[in-house]
Image (cartoon, rainbow, N blue to C red):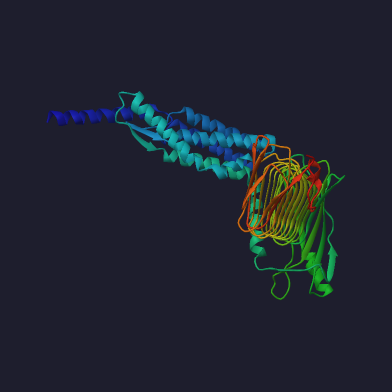
Amino acid sequence: MISRRRRAESSASVHFHKADRHERDIFRGRGGFAFGLILILGGALLILLHQKPAWLQTTIRDFGTEISAAALILIGLFLGVKEPVSTRHTIKIGRYTAALLLIVTGGLLLADEWRGTDHIFILLSWWPSLFVILGLEYLARYTYFRYRRSSAKEWRFRPDIRGMLLCLFAAGSFFFVSQQEHFLHLWNRVSLNLTAAGVDYSEEADNRFLKPLLEIPVDLETSRLTVDQINGDIMIQRADIDRIRVRTEVWVDQEEPALAEAIAEQSVIEGDEGSIISIQAKGKSYGQSGKRQPRMNLDITIPDDRRFDMELRTMNGAITLLGVEAIRNIELESGNGPITLSGVYGDVTGKTLNGNINIRNVNGNVKLSSNSGSIQSYDVTGNAVLTTQVGNITANRLAEDIEVKTKNGNISLAGVRQALKAESLNGAVDIRSGLIGGAWDVYSAVGEMVIHIPLIGDYSLEGTTSYGTIFTDIPFFRVEQKKVTGRIGSGDHSIKIEGNSNLNIYRSYPDTDNRSGERGQIPLPY
């Protein structure tokens, strides 16, 4: 009886102290001070949003991103400093992880706004790291309370689900609102995919029309240009102008002139201004199936004193860039058509399902692929990754690392100076270099391989063939049955060659870098 009474008194005392503590906490509960303050601030904000004063619109337009980022950082710092509300012997885990998420999101928003970058999209790829951070927080707090506090031996650890969900909602809201232009563009791409499914394409035949010139102002904060269309070529070049100019050529085949003119008039070009300029070609469907698209070729001229990152996309047509300079990168995609680059500055990535790729004088990295088409590349200053399923690959004067791959086609490379990876499943391989500056990995399943390498350098060589013969005129290399080995200098760089047909290794001099297609031996002065 006495023990039961003491437990009851102890329980009552605990509840009394809890109630007393809650009464003293003016920021707790519906009747607390914080509830009234939230009502006042929320009502004032609703009034401002409803009245829409000019100063508020200007502030949101000019400083909306900075204010949002600063708010995220401040909220994250507050949550990181404030100890999460916990019941007795219960520790809530996740508050510091959520605070870190808010701070990082705000920091990325500020960095993107000040530097014109898109680092905020790192969150889309690295969001699983939140689980790692949450685990680290759990281990740190578990260790602290279990081993640092000798009096706390019965602590229970529970996730702060409400706090984490609120922080995720806040970070996601600011992310989507601040990057709404990117998501609108993504939705436009999805719409184009749905529209292009199963359509017929007009050819450049029968009826030709020219649309009025479209001019799009360029703001100081404009940093990106996107072009989307279904059927037609896209050509971009520079000129001494202050606005973006779009000339549109419309072709409507298989129709009478009067009806074709009406279809051309209903086919429009739309351009959106702002930090991201979006150009869309919207053709009027026609024909018996109602799915035939007129061909709308776009000739786009941009100011020569401005640089834009670019994203160009057409379902059926060629993409051509002449003398274009990007801030960082250019993304290209063509469902059916060639890609041509000449005098381009910036990193280029792109693909075409059916078309040749021609590259000349690109200052940057290149990563391009074609399902069915040959690739020719000359004078690329950065790394190059060239891939085709069916087609030949030719590349000359390569400054950095190169990777080429074709399943059915020949490979011809000259001027290889750094690391090389070349693979052809069915085709000959011809590689010429006057300088070995990186590791080589060359493979040909079916096709003769001819390799020209210098006598001066620091590399080791190992070549094998399953069914062909091996020939070399370099006396330092040793041929034994189906294998050739050797080393020049210190052997820092490795050259590995593997195939099933004949393998010929010739000596070369540095002046052979610019020669492609020649095959023969260069005399070696003994």
Residue 191 at x, y = what percent?
64, 59
Asked if one can make out residue 456 in the rendered structure from this viewpoint, the answer is yes
**Location of the C terminus (image quadrant):** top right
What residue is rendered at 79% in x and 41% in y?
510
Number of numbered discs:
0
**Residue 476's image quarter?**
top right
**Residue 224's image quarter?**
top right
Q: Is residue 197 left or right of residue 284?
A: left
Asked if one can make out residue 222 in the rendered structure from this viewpoint, the answer is no
Between 104 and 219, the one nearer to me in the picture: 104
Q: Is residue 340 left or right of residue 78?
A: right
**Location of the N terminus (image quadrant):** top left
Between 356 and 281, the one nearer to me in the picture: 356
Residue 526 higher or lower than 195, as above or below:
above
Residue 390 at x, y = what percent?
68, 61
Q: Which residue is most to the right? A: 240
Residue 109 at x, y = what percent?
62, 37
Residue 356 at x, y = what percent?
75, 58
Q: Which residue is most to the left? A: 1
Between 35 and 480, the one nearer to me in the picture: 480
